[in-house]
Image (cartoon, grey):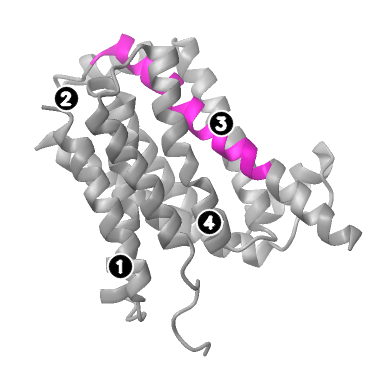
């Protein structure tokens, strides 16, 4: 019984880390990349300048650190939990990215976009509730 | 056209990478030691699995495509559209792996696609 609650606790902890750090990483990368701007030319000098700006942006490094934290939590939880269990739980990250985009970047989340994100969360949840294996084991 | 290509890379390489990493983690075994040294040992063990390198490589491609998209579009637009990976995963499972995708899973994929469509329409 105790072992089971321990598994639940560490699973919830890892899922919480995933749901917070994946959207946070994307928002920080978005902030960093907005300062770099779109790459309009594929000339080596232009690409080199863009890479310098990307590498020199603290937001990019913070974003990468956040995504690495997400990735480690993702790897760790997949070592004992099913992918089909982890996938629906992580659907909340789409809602969190909208919230963080609004709060940290000041992006406008229109009612239409909010409705779309809510539907995506529902759809991912429904997908995740289906049996993970649909074919016979070999 | 450039945006469609970047979204294609994010969805296809990202989904493929996740599946490869998932398979690698099942091979590497369960994490039992959560101390930093234990986690480092576990990561090094996972890196000895070929699927991990394939997964990390594909996820790296998806990451740089994501950086390219984030430079030109809002985060609240880019990230929800990447949910199309669920549709790509179901279609790939059905066409290439010949899995029997249940009606409930197709329903979930359809809901995701409607949601992504709303997000795409919100850009106008």
Question: Mark 3 vs mark 4: same chain?
Answer: no
Residue drawn at x 47%, y 61% as measured from the top left: A128
Measure the alpha-carbon separation of dots 3 and 4.
Answer: 18 Å
Badge 1: chain ID: B
Decide: few, some or many residues near mark 1? Use Cα within 10 Å; few <14, some 14-19, many ≥20.
Answer: some
Badge 2: chain ID: A
Decide: few, some or many residues near mark 4? Use Cα within 10 Å; few <14, some 14-19, many ≥20.
Answer: many
Measure the alpha-carbon separation of dots 2 and 4.
Answer: 32 Å
Measured along the vertical axis of the image, is residue A86 above or below residue B62? below
Disc assigned to residue A64? none
Q: Is residue B61 left or right of residue B41?
A: left
Look at the image and tell me in which quarter the N terminus of chain A lies.
bottom right
Q: Are marks 1 and 4 in contact (CB under 8 Å)?
A: no
Question: Mark 2 vs mark 4: same chain?
Answer: no
Q: Which residues are magenta?
A: A14-37
Instruction: Residue under label 3, please give it.
Output: A21
Question: Mark 1 vs mark 4: same chain?
Answer: yes
Where does the image place residue A82, in percent across and percent down from the top left? 60, 63
Q: Is residue A133 left or right of residue A54?
A: right
Measured along the vertical axis of the image, is residue A134 above or below residue B59? below
Badge 4: chain ID: B
Residue mark closest to the camera, 1 vs 4 = 1
Where does the image place residue B104, in percent across and percent down from the top left? 36, 70
Residue mark closest to the camera, 2 vs 1 = 1
Instruction: Give the camera-side residue of A69 and A122.
Output: A122
3 or 2: tag closer to the N-terminus: 3
Residue drawn at x 25%, y 24% as measured from the top left: A110
Measure the alpha-carbon separation of dots 3 and 1.
Answer: 29 Å
């Amino acid at each position: 019984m105790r072992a089971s609650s321990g598994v639940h606790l560490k699973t919830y902890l890892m899922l919480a880390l995933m749901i917070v750090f994946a959207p946070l990483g994307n928002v920080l990368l978005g902030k960093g990349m907005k300062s770099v701007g779109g790459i309009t030319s594929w000339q080596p000098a232009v690409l080199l300048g863009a890479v310098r700006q990307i590498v020199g942006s603290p937001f990019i490094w913070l974003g990468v650190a956040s995504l690495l934290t997400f990735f480690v939590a993702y790897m760790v939880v997949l070592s004992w939990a099913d992918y089909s269990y982890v996938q629906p739980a992580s659907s909340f990250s789409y809602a969190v990215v909208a919230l963080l985009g609004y709060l940290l970047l000041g992006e406008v989340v229109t009612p239409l976009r909010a409705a779309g994100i809510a539907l995506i969360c529902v759809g991912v949840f429904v997908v995740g509730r289906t049996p993970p294996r649909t074919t016979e084991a070999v | 056209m450039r945006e469609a290509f970047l979204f294609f890379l994010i969805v296809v390489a990202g989904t493929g990478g996740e599946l490869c990493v998932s398979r690698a983690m099942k091979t590497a075994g369960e994490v039992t030691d959560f101390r930093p040294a234990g986690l480092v040992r576990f990561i090094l063990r996972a890196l000895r699995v070929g699927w991990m390198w394939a997964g990390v490589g594909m996820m790296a491609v998806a990451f740089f495509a994501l950086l390219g998209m984030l430079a030109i579009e809002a985060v609240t637009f880019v990230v929800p559209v990447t949910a199309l990976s669920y549709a790509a995963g179901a279609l790939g499972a059905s066409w290439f792996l010949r899995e029997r995708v249940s009606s409930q899973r197709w329903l979930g994929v359809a809901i995701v696609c409607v949601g992504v469509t709303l997000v795409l329409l919100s850009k106008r």
